Image (cartoon, grey):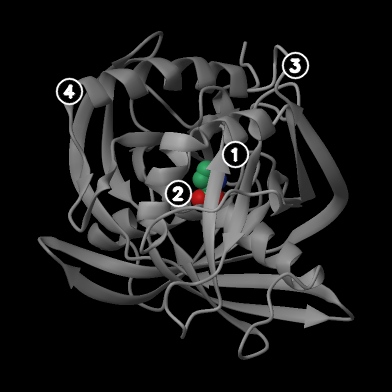
Amino acid sequence: MNSKTFFCVDAHTCGNPVRLVAGGGPVLKGANMSEKRQHFLKEFDWIRTGLMFEPRGHDMMSGSILYPPHDADNDVAVLFIETSGCLPMCGHGTIGTITIAIEEGLIKPKTPGVIRMEAPAGLVLIDYVEKNNRVISVKLRNVPAYLAAEDLQVDCPDLGRLTFDVAYGGNFYAIIDPQENFKGIQDFTASQLIAWSQVIRKRINDVYTFVHPQDATIKGCSHILWAGDPIDPTSTARNAVFYGDKAIDRSPCGTGTSARMAQWHAKGKLKTGDVFIHESIIGSKFIGKVEDTLKMEQYDAIIPSIEGWARVYGYNTIKIDHSDPYANGFQV
Ligand code: PYC
């Protein structure tokens, strides 16, 4: 087989891309999406790199592939494909994927307006609002989120020593709140944040280990959440989330917002029922809420919800020709 064609629908969620592979995705082995994620990473990762990296994608590119659910009560199962790998969970990816799937008729939910979605990180319950064949908003009740560690330290080039917390919201986040050596993202460019993130993420993972208590395949601090002042004073907070090797999320980051709400809840700054409006680097917003709490192993976890919107902008038939020297993509 010299080439493979993928039928994709492209959208963005609050500014960050979502490329849903509607045709051409591989058949995967596994009893759930966590196992299928491992199979994909072992045998089909060229599809991810070919579709996410340059020349067919770019540093921020992110996408998904739909699978039938493993439990007949659920509506769909989703694999997230990103420049960073296959994330256990992706909030902006979910909002974009559901918007595309409903508008394009790729999912027929058992109950209109409600979708039970299996992600590698667990079950995600979704409510969406549709008007005139357009999805206006998507609200996801995420997997449990928790504060994993507090007051850790890392040395950052230029800034010096930084104190950070680590929280899980579907991925592990190092959260850098404003402090003596870092007054907030408003003082810095995206390129500066990216350069520092590359260094400190490595330093953090060299020293500390983070493993999900219920799924050992979810491990490592993959994302850095830099905090700062909101642009709109009615927002709760703003962030710049670093992911992959060179990306700052243009959306407010669903799993990052979940992690931050878990951090605030654990510190007594948010309580059950509170709303948390999170702004992205470009000022787009997600509405977060602490829906519930639960005990998860040794952690006091929250059930966060995230609400946002996405827009479909194109249909993309992409060929990966194996004789192309850049078939599997590249990063500079
Ligand atoms: O929205 O969860 C998210 C996300 C993760 C990486 C980029 N966006």
At label 1, which amino acid type do we have? Asp
Q: Nearer the viewer, residue 209 or 43?
A: 43
Q: Measure how far apart labels 3 and 2 are at the Cα level.
A: 36 Å
Tell me where residue 92 sits by quadrant. bottom right
Q: Nearer the viewer, residue 314 or 194?
A: 314
Q: Label 1, secondary structure: give it.
A: loop
In the rendered structure, which disc, 3 or 2, sits on the residue that comes first in sequence?
A: 2
At label 3, which amino acid type do we have? Asp
Q: Which residue matches tag 3?
A: 324
Q: Which residue matches tag 1?
A: 249
Q: Which residue matches tag 4?
A: 207
When the figure is inspected, residue 199 is found, relative to residue 201, above or below; the finding is above
Distance from mark 1 CB to nearest ligand 1 atom below 8 Å: yes
Distance from mark 2 CB to nearest ligand 1 atom below 8 Å: yes
Q: Which mark is residue 30?
A: none
**Is residue 41 in view?**
yes
Return the x and y of residue 7 as percentages of the image width and height: 79, 49
Task: Using a 10 Å C-alpha cutoff, classify the residue at mark 1 as few (fewer than 14 neighbours), some (14 to 19) or many (20 or more).
Answer: many
Would you say the residues marked 2 and 1 are in contact, meaning their CB atoms lie under 8 Å apart? Answer: yes
When the figure is inspected, residue 112 is found, relative to residue 64, above or below; the finding is below
In the rendered structure, which disc, 4 or 1, sits on the residue that comes first in sequence?
A: 4
Q: Which residue matches tag 2?
A: 256
Return the x and y of residue 141 as percentages of the image width and height: 47, 72
Q: Nearer the viewer, residue 269 or 61?
A: 61
